[in-house]
Image (cartoon, rainbow, N blue to C red):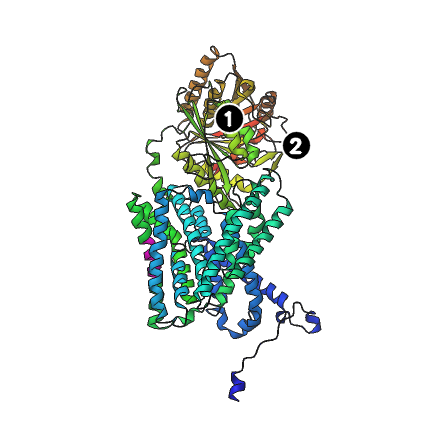
């Protein structure tokens, strides 16, 4: 009886698919339908938790760890009926296999984000900070492991367990850190650059140590076997460098910018990744190590690496990685942490992990003369954890990783707020409008663009804006707006991003990026100083990056692309409505004047050389601050020898019962506004005598039809310059033309399909100390 009671009973293997519920089969008794249920449950739970944690700006890995714990015996798994039905023990092998396949490709993606060239050029300061961030917590982890081994982990092998604990304490999760930095808009700051570089060194070192630990743990008690495993591991790395690095370089050379990467190359690379994982598993090192090494060897220049990330990332991070955390959560039972001793050990593990990282990083950072606030921020960022691969004391280590990662974002937000960094920037920021700048002074413009489609018109507008071409007369900051999505492929921009205001390409590296080539070539041929920058942020707060960049660079105007693009037939079509709300928020919060550019191929679809510029610009002037700003910009442009400027001053004579609406500008009395208008117009008339390319007309109009007729009269010009909210305007000028309040009534008229013109339009709003009231009620719903 006793022997029968203790005899283990192996559950029968599960069949793949069922015959259907109508034939009496329960789907949960078969592998495929059960796996589908498990995947759906994991995805729904982790996405819901991620949504709840979004206000706290937590990386998705935190939600996935919490979701895994909730699905396991710590929470929902306490119900044995649920656990036996949804996660029976005989199904865990399939779940673990699928999760580990995903983990293999995830580590390949982590390797893809590592640039060995950047690591080899890491300065002594970054290297010192990284080594301190590894060595101090590694030593404390080994010390803590002695305490754990003598209390709750008495049966574990000594040396492998010590190394596992040291790695768990010292590792910095590179992908998690990149996501946190991007969410906090620190990716391109000094602190972000140092954290990313140090984390890259940490990650590589930690995975090498982890491979060593796995080799020791799988070699039994024979030191000869352990040596063989280490030698074979070194041989694998050397062989991969000799064989696969030239192979990947050959693939990269055969893939060109703007062309899709061949399916053969993608499939071959993914097959090689699995083969490398198989080899390292045969050697006795974890299969993840082989995929990680292959990822490092893939060239970071060219479209091959980006294409691999785009094709693999969604499936791995969106589907497979949550399965890994669910699989880990099924092994994590927080309820096993009972009694004063267990909770005391948990506190000890968390304290020593945080203390070691903070002391090591802050101490060396201060020795390298990094300020206190930046040093502490760096220490907190380097304390973020990710994967936990050690089965020993699993519950404690999972909670430690969850705690250290969770506290990273709120602590950094408290001690290193962007507002604190930018608090003193606006003290000497005076020239917030073009009208306030003397013609002989330098004009600073922040030109924003979303894609390469915006580049030709943007460059042609910059060329027209340079005026007479005097040295340093115009400085342009070209801000590439990149959306930060849930995909880590956006983090590949880390390799291009540099300190705000510096070129975002790597000096000394031949980069085939079209944007880089376009701006670099234009800067060489013109007298304009162009400083390309990049912004990586979500669409909900992209306007914050734009406004902060304009303030830090003391720009007088922000130029934004309109959210509609021109089709082949000349009509404007909506591309992404999200960009429209970005423009709305910039208009409401901008620290300077704003211009919205409606692109109708200004100067053609390619860059126009300075000697070939021949453009006619029309300023439609009703009156008011926005119109004066548009006129001031037009006068600047008219200094260019290839620019002809026509100013059409429209005076409205109200008809009784007509359709003319008067718009109050809230800039004082109407008489004061009229005096300012008359002053700038009289100064412009004086310039006509000295510059034959200038033209001025005064039109007296009575109704909307006459306004439309006058605008249509100048429809053959290259560019319209108009104010967003003139003093007195016909509203609406055309039916359906008021759909875009960010353009104002005249701008809406100029983009209306009822008006026949091929001219681009720049709608200008002058900076004022109050946000525009007409946009305050616009919602994103």
Q: Can residue 531 be seen by looking at this rendering? A: yes
| Residue 665 located left or right of residue 699 | left
Circle on res. 568:
2
Count of marks, rendered view = 2
Mark number displayed over residue 522: 1
Q: Residue furthest front?
A: 224
Query: Magenta segment: does it hold 250?
Result: no
| Percent of width and height locating residue 766 | 44, 29
Q: Which residues are magenta?
A: 350-358
Q: Is residue 605 above or below residue 189?
A: above
Report the residue at 63% width, 65% height from top.
Answer: 32
Q: Residue at x 55, y 44 (%)?
A: 246
Q: Between residues 439 and 375, which one lies in front from this camera angle?
A: 375
Q: Is residue 355 one of those drawn in magenta?
A: yes
What is the magenta segment's predominant secondary structure?
Answer: helix
Is residue 487 among the parts visible in the rendering? no
Labels 2 and 1: the sequence-earlier one: 1
Q: Is residue 416 left or right of residue 100?
A: left
Quadrant of the image occupied by residue 628:
top left
Task: Tell me the crowding category of disc 1: few under 14, some 14 to 19, or many 20 or more residues within 10 angstroms, Cα based.
Answer: many
Where disc 1 sits, the SS reads helix
How much space separates mark 2 and mark 1, taking CA atoms? Answer: 27 Å
């Amino acid at each position: 009886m006793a022997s029968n009671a203790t005899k283990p009973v192996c559950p029968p293997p599960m069949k793949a698919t069922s015959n259907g519920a109508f034939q009496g089969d329960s789907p949960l008794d078969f592998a495929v339908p059960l796996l589908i249920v498990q995947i759906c449950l994991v995805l729904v739970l982790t996405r819901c938790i991620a949504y709840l944690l979004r206000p706290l700006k937590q990386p998705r890995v935190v939600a996935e760890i919490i979701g895994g714990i909730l699905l396991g015996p710590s929470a929902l798994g306490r119900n044995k009926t649920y656990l036996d039905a949804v996660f029976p023990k005989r199904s865990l092998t399939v779940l673990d296999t699928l999760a580990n396949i995903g983990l293999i490709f995830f580590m390949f993606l982590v390797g893809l984000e590592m640039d060995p060239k950047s690591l080899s050029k890491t300065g002594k300061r970054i290297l010192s900070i990284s080594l301190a961030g590894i060595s101090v917590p590694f030593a404390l982890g080994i010390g803590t492991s002695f305490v754990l081994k003598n209390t709750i982990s008495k049966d574990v092998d000594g040396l492998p367990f010590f190394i596992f604990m040291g790695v768990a304490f010292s590792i910095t999760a590179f992908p998690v850190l990149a996501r946190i930095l991007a969410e906090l808009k620190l990716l391109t700051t000094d602190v972000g650059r140092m954290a990313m570089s140090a984390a890259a060194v940490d990650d590589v070192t930690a995975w090498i140590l982890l491979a060593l630990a796995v080799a020791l743990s799988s070699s039994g008690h024979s030191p000869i076997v352990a040596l063989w495993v280490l030698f074979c591991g070194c041989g694998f790395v050397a062989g991969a460098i000799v064989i696969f690095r030239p192979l990947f370089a050959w693939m990269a050379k055969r893939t060109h910018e703007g062309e899709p990467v061949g399916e053969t190359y993608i499939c071959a690379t993914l097959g090689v990744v699995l083969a490398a994982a198989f080899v390292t598993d045969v050697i006795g090192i974890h299969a993840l190590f082989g995929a990680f090494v292959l990822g490092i060897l893939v060239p970071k220049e060219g479209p091959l690496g980006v294409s691999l990330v785009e094709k693999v990332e969604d499936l791995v991070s969106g589907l497979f990685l949550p399965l890994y955390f669910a699989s880990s959560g099924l092994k994590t039972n927080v309820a096993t942490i009972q009694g004063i001793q267990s909770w005391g050990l948990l506190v000890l593990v968390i304290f020593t992990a945080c203390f070691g990282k903070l002391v090591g990083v802050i101490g060396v950072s201060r020795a390298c003369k990094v300020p206190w606030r930046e040093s502490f921020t760096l220490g907190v960022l380097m304390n973020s954890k990710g994967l936990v691969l050690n089965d020993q004391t699993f519950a404690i280590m999972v909670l430690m990783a969850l705690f250290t990662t969770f506290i990273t974002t709120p602590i950094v937000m408290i001690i290193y707020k962007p507002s604190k960094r930018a608090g003193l920037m606006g003290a000497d920021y005076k020239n917030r409008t073009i009208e306030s700048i003397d013609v002989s002074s330098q004009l600073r413009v922040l030109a924003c663009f979303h894609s390469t489609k915006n580049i030709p018109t943007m460059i042609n507008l910059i060329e027209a804006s340079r005026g007479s071409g005097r040295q340093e007369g115009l400085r342009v900051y070209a801000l590439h707006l990149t959306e930060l999505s849930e995909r880590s492929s956006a983090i590949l921009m880390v390799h291009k991003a540099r300190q705000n205001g510096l070129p975002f390409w790597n000096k000394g590296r031949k980069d085939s990026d079209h944007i880089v080539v376009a701006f670099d070539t234009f800067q060489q041929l013109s007298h304009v100083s162009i400083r390309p920058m990049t912004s990586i942020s979500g669409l909900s707060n992209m306007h914050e990056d734009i406004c902060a960049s304009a303030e830090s660079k003391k720009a007088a105007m922000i130029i934004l692309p309109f959210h509609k693009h021109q089709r082949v037939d000349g009509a404007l079509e909506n591309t992404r409505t999200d960009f429209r709300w970005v423009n709305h928020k910039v208009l409401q919060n901008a620290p300077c004047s704003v211009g919205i550019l409606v692109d109708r191929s200004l100067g053609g679809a390619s860059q126009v050389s300075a000697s070939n510029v021949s453009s006619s610009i029309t300023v439609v002037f009703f009156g008011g601050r926005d119109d004066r700003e548009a006129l001031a910009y037009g006068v600047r442009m008219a200094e260019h020898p290839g620019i002809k400027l026509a100013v059409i001053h429209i005076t409205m004579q109200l008809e009784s019962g007509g359709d003319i609406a008067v718009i109050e500008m809230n800039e004082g009395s109407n008489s004061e506004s009229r005096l300012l208008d008359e002053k700038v117009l009289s100064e412009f008339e004086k310039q006509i005598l000295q510059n034959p390319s200038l033209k001025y007309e005064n039109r007296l109009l009575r109704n909307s039809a006459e306004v439309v007729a006058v605008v249509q009269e100048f429809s053959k010009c290259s560019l319209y310059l108009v104010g967003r909210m003139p003093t007195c305007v016909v509203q609406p000028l055309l039916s359906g033309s008021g759909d875009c309040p960010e353009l104002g009534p005249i701008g809406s008229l100029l983009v209306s399909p009822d008006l026949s013109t091929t001219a681009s339009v720049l709608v200008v709003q002058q900076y004022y100390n109050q946000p525009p009231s007409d946009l305050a009620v616009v919602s994103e719903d």
